[in-house]
Amino acid sequence: HAKANGRDAMVEYFPELDVALNRRREIEATMREALVNKRFETVFQPITNPKDNSVIGFEALLRLTSESGEQIPPTEFIPIAEETGLIHELGLQTLRNAIKTALNWPSHVFLSVNMSPRQFDRDDLIEKISAILTELNFPAHRLELEVTESLLMENELRVSEHLADLRHLGISIAMDDFGTGYSSLGYLWKYEFNKLKIDKVFLEGYDFDGERYREIIETIVVLGHKMGMQVTIEGVEDERHTDMLQSLGCDQYQGFLFGKPMAAVETLDVPWGHAKTA
Ligand code: C2E
Ligand code: MG
Ligand code: MG
Ligand code: MG
């Protein structure tokens, strides 16, 4: 019988670990099956212009349903896709699917796609992305890739080269989930992002500690603008949020108030804005 401490503790049986491992294996198997049978779904959440609430872009978000009909959230399956290496195929399949939908939108509407840090481990990533754009005839300037700060901490030199190559293709780069994790001003300077996405934790914070969070959000917006970036705020859920945000000058809103992530066919019915005239 295992003791609670000492060497014997190492062989103690933890049923919870077994459950977690089985869950992981099941999700991995579901993902392998879903990749082959093209069962991953891409949904799209509108990103709006605060001036007239028109839709100016969409973020593509992955959805996976198990064979028994259970929705597995991306926060659970993406880390497993990263550990198993499935993220490489999944990432490119998602990009391709999302672009196919975006081809039906007005030409001024952009598409934003999340990139996992792991995808940057492959040196042919840029070539592959470029080939998909060419094949589908989708202009690079309508594509935005969202990366998180964890990416930047991994291999600074390789990552900065990859991001520069993507920008040279004309693709725009957004820093996602800004304000969570290891926010560093150094990274913001170094990587020249086109856009800063303020994480929804700040509007969640505003719900219980209004004044302080309004000031934090305002500071991040000013910071983003001073560094030459556009600023999007995530998690806009109600009019209390838009009332508070009105004077802060965010360039783009994203949140349930304007739309939950929706199926590809539904994106065709949103209130489009007009193309910007130069
Ligand atoms: P994210 O990229 O920050 O995406 C925004 C998440 O916030 C989405 O959750 C979206 O549904 C949710 N959201 C949007 N507006 C609101 C709101 O007003 N209130 C609340 N409470 N939530 C809101 P989702 O779809 O569950 O995705 C979670 C995360 O999973 C994403 O966070 C992203 O990090 C990751 N993910 C999703 N799809 C992909 C993908 O294709 N590739 C990669 N690498 N990661 C993905
Ligand atoms: Mg995102
Ligand atoms: Mg985000
Ligand atoms: Mg987020």
Image: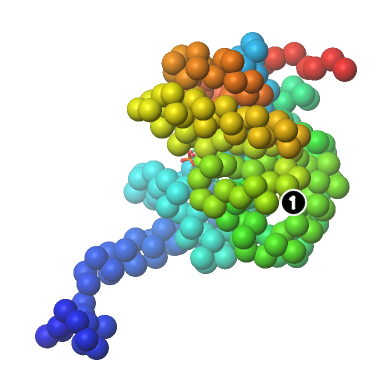
The quadrant of the rendering that contains the C terminus is top right
Helix, strand or loop at disc 1?
Answer: helix
Q: Quadrant of residue 201?
A: top left
| x then y, percent, for residue 159 | 72, 59
Q: Quadrant of the N terminus?
A: bottom left
- Report whether residue 46 is seen: no
| Above-or-below relation of 277 to 143 | above
Give percent across and percent down for residue 251. Answer: 66, 24
Compared to 23, does 270 lie above or below?
above
Identified at 67% across, 34% down, the residue is 224
Provide residue 197's location: percent of width, then percent of height: 60, 36
Q: Which residue lies furthest to the top in this view?
A: 52
Instruction: Say which of 216 and 96 sits in front.
Output: 216
Disc 1 under 8 Å from ligand 3? The reply is: no
**In the rendered structure, which amino acid carries the disc numbered 1?**
Lys
Instruction: Left or right? Give the position of 135 relative to 81.
Output: right
Name the residue carrying label 1.
Answer: 190
Q: Residue at image x 62%, y 56%?
A: 151
